[in-house]
Image (cartoon, grey):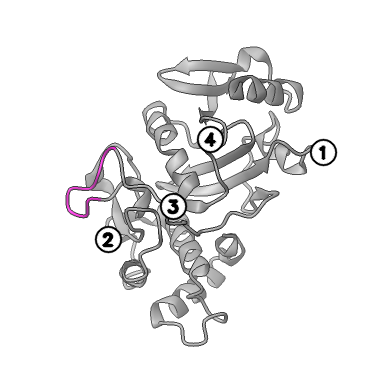
Amino acid sequence: MAEAIIEDLFTGVLEWSVGDMMYQLEYADIVVSRNLLKYLIIEVKRPGTLFPRRAALEQAVTQARRYADAQKIRKIAATDGRYFYAADLIAGALIDRVMLDLSVSQPSEALWHLSLYGIHRDDPRCGAEIPITDDVPAQTAALPEGLLHPKYALPAECFAYAPDINRPSSWKLPYRLADGRVDTKRLPKAIQSLLSTYRGAKVGGIPESDLPAVLVRLARAAFAEGRMPPEASASAPAYQLLLQVLEQRGLLEQAAHT
């Protein structure tokens, strides 16, 4: 059912053709492709299982990330037929592309970000018609499954930098707990360790080109927890420094979108 809804959406509204929709390609549920170039992997979930919460969305696209890494695709999505979430995968960080409720009667303008003409464009503004929250209710919190880091016993989505989801040794800067909540003890340490030698070509083994995505990922967690100034009247030095770096690099608007 969900696959049929997505095919109708992409071919009837977003100007892709039926031939652009490939199913079960190298185990991926749906791969959207045109002229031999693969643009997007879509993971199809059971109806009623996708929610607009940060941790839930990252867990939902975990399998899609594995397929994306294997097929060298940098855009991934998950849907349960009602909600549709898509993100760009940059340095192991998910940079939101759209968050949609497909049950509404009026199509959202944010759908352009998934269209044949918009999918290839980079835009720091997420096309989100509904907010993505960072809360993890106790009744829905899940224990980690699949591949875990040998030292921290955490999945890839708990790290700010995870360039290869199939290789735990590449994961750096843990900042979430196993159930998806922000680890408020590790978060400032992750920020400080990233920024302490910030002006070098590489920081803790993270390439300079990957730093913006990692900064945004950590900052979103800090904003969600109310740790960033000026909301937090007594912000720790790590958060104050992070705010300065975000402003200097023009990333503040993107990071503040939680």
Q: Indicate which label's residue lies in the foreground, 3 or 1.
A: 3
Q: Position of residue 5 (x, y in %)?
A: 66, 24
Going from the N terminus, do you reach mark 2 or mark 4 first? 4
Q: Which mark is residue 106?
A: 1
Residue placed under numbered mark 3 in the picture: 139
Quarter of the N terminus within the rendering: top right
Q: Amino acid at mark 2?
A: Gly
Q: Secondary structure at mark 1?
A: loop
Indicate whether residue 217 is drawn in magenta: no
User: Residue placed at 46% from the left, 16% from the top?
Assistant: 24
Task: Determine whether 173 is above or below 126 in the image.
Answer: below
Q: CA distance from mark 3 to mark 1?
A: 33 Å
Of residues 203 and 227, the one nearer the viewer is: 227
Marks 4 and 3 in Cβ contact (< 8 Å): no
Q: Position of residue 149 (x, y in %)?
A: 23, 48
Q: Secondary structure at mark 2?
A: loop
Quarter of the C terminus within the rendering: bottom right
User: Residue placed at 51% from the left, 73% from the top?
Assistant: 226
Q: Position of residue 61 (x, y in %)?
A: 46, 38
Q: CA distance from mark 4 to mark 1?
A: 21 Å
Provide the residue span drawn in magenta: 146-153
Going from the N terminus, do you reach mark 4 or mark 1 first? 4
Q: CA distance from mark 4 to mark 3?
A: 22 Å
Question: Is 152 left or right of 22, judged from the image as shown?
Answer: left
Q: Indicate which label's residue lies in the foreground, 4 or 3.
A: 3
Of residues 54 and 187, the one nearer the viewer is: 54
Q: Amino acid at mark 3?
A: Gln
